Image (cartoon, rainbow, N blue to C red):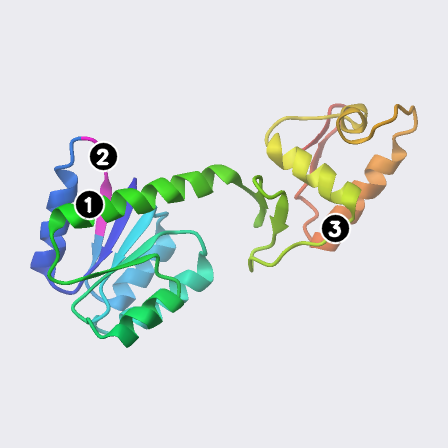
């Protein structure tokens, strides 16, 4: 698990980092950022599983930072750690997409418990999501989303083809395989598969989302 601690109080950030690194059950990789600009640079450079976010930050305020990160990533858990105990700040932070809010000072055991709970939820969500070319399939609800988290509207068969290939990411299926898995009836004419796949590519404006290995079949 890789965590980002965004906290301008260096001693506190170091204490949190060292405390989490001493966890014998979960092994963390942890980065620290001490202002909003450094935090954004590290966020867009690395892939994190959870963010601990202070609100009183130099250069970029924590709430503005939260808004930017959440607009880029809807799933990553964000836990606010703040001395701001005003209810309006707490409500605004949660409305902007924070998953939890812990007021300073806090007990470290409570912080660990909240981190563990958020990571468990995140792992469940990640296991339900498959992404290819900025298209994400929610396997639990069988819904396709684009990079802006908007639902992708395809015809029923186009949706079934793309979803099937994404669920079997990396595996190659020829046209007869696709007919057997998606259509109820057998047919020797499989030319309609190419028509559907070309339509998917054009609608999504992603010519490489479904690849074709000559002589073998299709895959994502």
* Sooner in the amino-acid sequence: mark 2 or mark 3: 2
Magenta segment: does it hold 27? Answer: yes
Rendered position, 190 above or below 155: above
Front in this rendered view, residue 203 or 20: 20
| Camera-side residue of 103 and 17 | 103
Q: Residue 109's x, y, as percent?
A: 14, 45
Element at label 3: loop
Q: SS for tag 2?
A: loop
Asked whether 10 falls inside the magenta stretch, the response is: no
Q: Earlier in the sequence, mark 2 or mark 1?
A: 2
Disc 3 target residue: 154
Q: Which mark is residue 27?
A: 2
The image quarter in which residue 38 lies = bottom left
Calculate the distance from the C-alpha at mark 2 to the C-alpha at mark 1.
Answer: 13 Å
Instruction: Report the side of 215 relative to 130 (left or right).
Output: right
Residue at 76 percent of width and 52 percent of height: 202
Image location (x, y in percent) of residue 183:
82, 30
The residue lying at 45 percent from left, 56 percent from top is 74
Considering every residue shown, the one lying at the far front of the view is: 87
C-alpha gap between disc 2 and disc 3: 42 Å
Q: CA distance from mark 3 to mark 1?
A: 43 Å
In the rendered view, does 32 fall on the left or right side of 156?
Answer: left
Q: Residues within 10 Å of mark 2 (few under 14, many from 20)?
A: few
Q: Which mark is residue 124?
A: none
The residue mark sitting in front, 2 or 1, is: 1
Q: Which mark is residue 112?
A: 1
Q: Are marks 2 and 1 in contact (CB under 8 Å)?
A: no
Local SS, label 1: helix
Q: Which residues are magenta?
A: 25-31
Measured as percent of width and height from the top left, residue 153 is found at 71, 54
Disc 3 or disc 1, which is closer to the eye?
1
Query: Is residue 20 or residue 30 the one in the foreground?
Result: 20
């Amino acid at each position: 698990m890789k965590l980002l601690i965004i906290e301008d109080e260096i001693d506190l950030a170091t204490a949190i980092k060292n405390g989490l690194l001493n966890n014998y059950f979960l092994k963390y990789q942890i980065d620290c950022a001490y202002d909003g600009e450094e935090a954004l640079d590290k966020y867009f450079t690395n892939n994190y599983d959870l963010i601990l976010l202070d609100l009183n930050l130099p250069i970029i305020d924590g709430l503005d930072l939260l808004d930017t990160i959440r607009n880029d990533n809807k799933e990553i858990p964000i836990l606010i750690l703040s001395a701001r105990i005003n209810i309006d700040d707490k409500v605004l932070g949660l409305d902007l997409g924070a998953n939890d809010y812990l007021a300073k000072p806090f007990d470290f055991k409570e912080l660990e418990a909240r981190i563990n709970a958020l990571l468990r939820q995140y792992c469940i969500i990640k296991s339900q999501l498959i992404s290819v070319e900025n298209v994400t399939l929610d396997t639990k609800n069988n819904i396709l989303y684009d990079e802006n988290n908007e639902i992708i509207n395809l015809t029923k068969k186009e949706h079934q083809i793309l979803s099937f290939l994404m669920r079997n990411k990396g595996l190659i299926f020829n046209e007869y395989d696709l007919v057997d898995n998606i259509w109820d009836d057998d047919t020797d004419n499989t030319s309609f598969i190419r028509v559907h796949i070309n339509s998917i590519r054009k609608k999504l404006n992603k010519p490489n989302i479904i690849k074709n290995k000559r002589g073998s079949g299709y895959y994502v």
